[in-house]
Image (cartoon, rainbow, N blue to C red):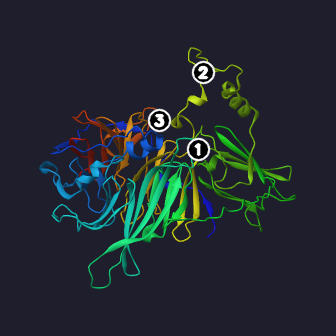
Amino acid sequence: MALSNSSLKVNRELLDPNFESYRLSLDAIATYNIELDAAVEEVKLKDTQYTLEHVRAFGMYNYLHLDPWYEDSVLFVDCKGRVLSLTVTLDTALCKPREVYRISPDSSRCEDRLCASLSFTSATWAALSDGAGQLQLLRTGKRGGSSLMKWEPLFSEEMEEPFTILHSISHVQDGVHTMEVLLLRIQKDPQETKGSGYSVSLEWITVANAAGHGQEKKYEVKKRRILRGKSVPHYAAVEPQGKGLMVASEKPFAFTHVDGRPVELTDPEPMEVEKTDPIYFWQQTAEDITMCMRMPEGVTKEEVQFRLTADNIRLGVQGFPPLLEGQLFASVDPEASAWIIKNDKSLEVTLQKRTEGPMWSELVIGDKRGENVMSDEQAALIHERLTFLTSEDLNGNPDRDKPPCNSQELEDCDGFPEDSSSLTHFDGESLKPTQVVNLGSHQYLFTVDGNPSEMPCFCLRHDVDALVWQPRPDQPSYVQASKRDKKFATCAPDFSYASLCECLRRIFIYRQPSPVETVLFNRKQGRQVGQVAKQQVASLDCDKPILGFRATNERLYILTSSNLFVLKVNNN
């Protein structure tokens, strides 16, 4: 199966070109507080867990788990090893979380213990890690608010080293109930002579029912696969039916072992790319684009086929395939754009940018046949901005009171990643990557379960927008405010609002634009405003760090070591 490179194509119909900003709303948010009988045990990082990857994987762990199959149902594990569940139906009559399962007390004795982790495999199954290296698959029954069924472990196995669970799914394959579980570890790597000495390991485990018809159910491991990389993945999930695996990370992953045996994957031979001359040249300013393409001599304007919309261009000669066709990098104003034939041998197209300022990195998305020619003014401006990098003075910064930078003193988090982030799909049979999407500079924000029967969605930052991606359409967009102390971010499964929290107390809620009851006018443009996007801020009556943060369509759940807060956000 050949490897293909793809790109994320933004559905611009989902973006609101008239969006201005969020307006701070002082509307009160109903907040309910449940005091816990026992504290949530926060597992602190040890001195041996000193790398940036340890902090990303375990130091910022979300201790609160949302059950995607049952709305407004959250779970967490306390210091007694109890898995506690809370399902909210009436905010004013909140009950204490009830125990559904208890982890063995022996797990707390593990020296390298991690936080316990939980993943909901299906509507009736869950995967649980005790943080000490034991994996359990539990038959939960229907977990709703009225269910009093205690969870039953039907599979338990020691996995040698502690891990956290990233994702799990359940499916029936050839009449056999099968579960796929994805585990994360950070391990000492003896082959790593440079850097931290640690590598990131993902283990994909397939567990299936091995019992015959009419016998007691018995589950056992059918297959184990290990991938290794150098960075904690932003996103990792198993494809439905276990057909593949998707991983988004700053540095690449590759399969190294299957069932304990090394994987021999031959490196693909480098592709020889034939260097060809560009078929068009283009320049840009902050306001417009100028593109020039050579045309066959003698072509008249009647033979030129030119079609331009706000987001697409099609250019060619009558009777021949299109010379240039595709989605533009950004929107243009078709009515203010034009084209002319120059010297009977070239076509010059002027495109008026709809948004002034942002510079385009390419003319047509994915088209590499053009060359961006930089104007003298642009080259001089860039040279001026980069002068300090080539200054003879070690400290080119005008603020000479500050000491010069020594690159040897930089930590991992201070530098740019060596590899750009990418989303890779691995085939479940061949274990080879089949598709790679370059995420470039699009910052990963969070993961959310839109539909539990599909793969989780992931949210990326695109300039000032935060876009939710999944292999299905109709995803709206959000704007993420710049918060220096941001710890967790998420959005509702129905995308009606987005939210983020700081390490302590403050919660920020961003709502989709909604009609206003009063008459409002934009002061700058003098036009009436029909919709307003609201921002709300809530402050918790608690001085302890936030350990968990989840959103449902109606409520926000915030977990600290001693309290579980419920915020009524929407009235549906």
Residue at the image position 55 percent from the left and 66 percent from the top? 431
Q: Secondary structure at mark 3?
A: loop
Q: Residue at x 57, y 39 (%)?
A: 416
* In front of the other: 289 or 42: 42
**Which amino acid type is shown beneath numbered disc 2?**
Pro
Height in image: 348 above or below 238? above
Residue 523 location (% of width, % of height): 43, 32
Q: Label 3 belongs to which residue?
A: 525
Tag 1: residue type? Answer: Thr
101 shown above or below 355:
below
Residue receiving disc 2: 404
Residue 221 versus residue 436 in the image, above or below: below
Check disc 1 and report the residue beneath it: 193
State the CA–CA distance, disc 3 to disc 1: 61 Å
Mark toward the viewer: 3 or 1: 1
Q: If you read the primary sequence from the N terminus, does the residue marked by circle 3 or circle 1 appear first?
A: 1
Q: Single out the mark in the foreground, 2 or 1.
A: 1
Secondary element under disc 2, as helix, strand or loop, is: loop
Where is residue 228? Give x, y as percent. Answer: 52, 55
CB contact under 8 Å: marks 3 and 1: no
Whether residue 100 sits left or right of residue 461 in the image: it is: left
Residue at the limit of the structure toward the bottom, as seen here: 213
